[in-house]
Image: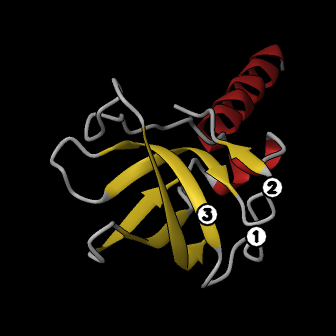
């Protein structure tokens, strides 16, 4: 009888541990963490999703050249829990934003958001690694 109880307890514990979500993380190896770049641009698309929300926006330089940027934030669910409030209605095409980010080491117009200044002036900070 005692053996059955212990066996049931161990089996339940193993099932509980096996079904728990495990934290996973990919590194920032693709990004240059030693410097941040700040650009102003116009939103073309805002995708709120897990594991990362994506902001697509266009930046026009002084010569009129347009760079199409794609930057990621932390996980939408984690940001929601931290009060960042990344909702699908937060940004819409045509909105003007200022993005401070870690940029890709290979020079491509991709990055990881650190700060995002919204069209209304509010500052969103993504302090996730």
Q: Residue furthest front?
A: 62
Q: Earlier in the sequence, mark 1 or mark 3?
A: 1
Instruction: Please provide percent x and percent y for residue 11.
Output: 67, 32
Q: Is residue 48 visible?
A: no
Q: Earlier in the sequence, mark 3 or mark 2?
A: 2
Q: Which residue is mark 3?
A: 97
The kind of secondary structure element at disc 1 is loop
The kind of secondary structure element at disc 3 is strand
Cα distance in 3D space between marks 2 and 1: 8 Å
Cα distance in 3D space between marks 3 and 2: 16 Å
Q: Is residue 2 left or right of residue 54?
A: right
Q: Residue at x 26, y 72 (%)?
A: 63
Q: Nearer the viewer, residue 29 or 106?
A: 106
Instruction: Please provide percent x and percent y for residue 106.
Output: 15, 47
Q: Which residue is mark 2?
A: 85
Indicate the quadrant containing the N terminus: top left, top right, bottom left or bottom right: top right
Q: Nearer the viewer, mark 3 or mark 2?
A: 3
The relative height of residue 53 versus residue 22 in the rendered view (above or below) is: below
Cα distance in 3D space between marks 1 and 3: 11 Å
Q: Residue at x 36, y 29 (%)?
A: 35
Q: Is residue 20 visible?
A: yes
Q: Residue at x 33, y 66 (%)?
A: 61
Instruction: Please provide percent x and percent y for residue 4.
Output: 77, 25
Q: Nearer the viewer, mark 2 or mark 1?
A: 1
Q: Quadrant of residue 105?
A: top left
Q: How is the image coloured?
A: secondary structure
Q: Residue at x 40, y 65 (%)?
A: 70
Q: Quadrant of residue 22?
A: top right
Q: Which residue is mark 1?
A: 90
Check if mark 2's residue and mark 1's residue have beta carbons within 8 Å. yes
Q: Residues within 10 Å of mark 2 (few under 14, many from 20)?
A: some
């Amino acid at each position: 009888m005692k053996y059955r109880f212990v066996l049931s307890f161990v089996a339940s514990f193993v099932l509980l541990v096996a079904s728990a979500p495990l934290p996973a993380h990919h590194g920032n190896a693709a990004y240059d963490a030693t410097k941040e770049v700040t650009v102003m641009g116009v939103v073309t698309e805002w995708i709120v999703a897990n594991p990362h929300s994506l902001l697509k926006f266009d930046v026009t330089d002084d010569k009129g050249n347009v760079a199409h940027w794609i930057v990621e934030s932390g996980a939408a669910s984690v940001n929601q829990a931290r009060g960042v409030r990344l909702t699908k209605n937060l940004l819409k095409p045509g909105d003007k934003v200022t993005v401070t980010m870690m940029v890709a080491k290979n020079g491509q117009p991709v990055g990881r958001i650190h700060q995002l200044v919204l069209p209304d002036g509010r500052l969103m900070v993504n302090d996730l690694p």
